[in-house]
Amino acid sequence: MVHLTADEKSLVSGLWSKVNVDEVGGEALGRLLVVYPWTQRFFDSFGDLSSPDAVMGNPKVKAHGKKVLNSFSDGLKNLDNLKGTFAKLSELHCDKLHVDPENFKLLGNVLVCVLARHFGKQFTPQAQGAFQKVVAGVANALAHKYH
Amino acid sequence: MSLTKAERTVILSMWDKISAQADAIGTEALERLFASYPQTKTYFPHLDLRPGSAHLRVHGAKVVAALGDAVKSIDNIAGALAKLSELHAYILRVDPVNFKLLSHCLLVTVASHFPADFTADAHTAWDKFLSIVSCVLTEKYR
């Protein structure tokens, strides 16, 4: 369970309401693949990932980033039950996708960097602290059903 | 892991902007570290870590100055940070996991101050550079 104070909840929902989830999703996933290129191992079918420009412009990366972040967005509506919310996805990532949960932490931190870039000064240390709790909670929930 | 020529260029080109706000950036990175990872405060019982404190500013400035030393000797970071490496290994003994946390907070600070410069390429270069600095600072631990 993620324990956010009332202030933190309002920081998170306040900032998130201004996020273009589709775009930020594409940017976060793209940066994951560029900054940590070994993460490309899961995306052989995505086509051209040969350069940062190719990755950031790749339509499959954008589409998948959109999917991932919309799912993350659902989690934000259920901070009191992230494990329940992500149970099925957790099983999928373990049994079918075979993704090391370390990758969830990497993506969470990349997302925080992208939010900082978009919000600048508004992404205060307190706001970051709140989001770090959220991304850690989501990462844990996605790893919860691994066996 | 070492920096490509292109990555060195990116870092050098952004460094002027960063060093112009060195104190603010160092201070902010530390504030972010303590806000997101409160356990890191355990290394500073002797300092006043409240946002705005003089201690925080002095220490933040120190951190960014050290990064500046690494940038100025970007081809020999181990040489530039040799003394700091010994300090961390024998005196400070900060658990290695914390270098990743501070590195992340430095990235977040740079991203928030320089959104246009913080492209995916720049993000990669800075992440690598900070990883290298972290390695140098922990390489004498045992």
Image: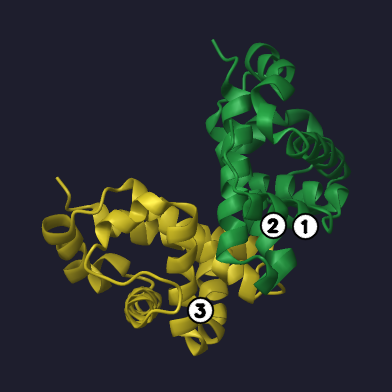
Using the numbered discs, state the Cα–Cα distance from disc 1 to disc 3 in whole angstroms: 36 Å
**Which quadrant of the figure contains the N terminus of chain A?**
top right
Give the mark toward the camera: 1 or 3: 1
Residue A145 sits in quarter = top right
| Residue extending farthest front | A6
Q: Are marks 2 and 3 in contact (CB under 8 Å)?
A: no
Residue A143 visible in image = yes
Q: Is residue B60 above or below residue A41?
A: below
Residue B12, which numbered label? 3
Q: Residues within 10 Å of mark 3 (few under 14, many from 20)?
A: some
Image spot of residue A17 (x, y percent) = 84, 54
Q: Drawn colour of chain A?
A: green
Left or right placement of residue B21 versus residue A34 in this view: left
Left or right placement of residue A17 versus residue B52 in this view: right
**Which quadrant of the figure contains the C terminus of chain A?**
top right
Q: Residues within 10 Å of mark 1 (few under 14, many from 20)?
A: few
Image spot of residue B13 (x, y percent) = 56, 81
Seen at 51% across and 80% down, the residue is: B15
| Residue extending farthest left | B90
Residue A54 visible in image = no
Q: Is residue A117 above or below residue B39?
A: below
Seen at 52% across and 81% down, the residue is: B18
The residue under label 1 is which amino acid type? Gly
Seen at 62% across and 26% down, the residue is: A141
Residue A114 sits in quarter = bottom right
Observer-nearest residue: A77 or A20? A77
- Reading the image, the residue beneath label 2 is A11
Q: Residues within 10 Å of mark 2 (few under 14, many from 20)?
A: many
Give the mark toward the camera: 2 or 3: 2
Residue A14, which numbered label? 1
Q: Are marks 2 and 3 on the same chain?
A: no
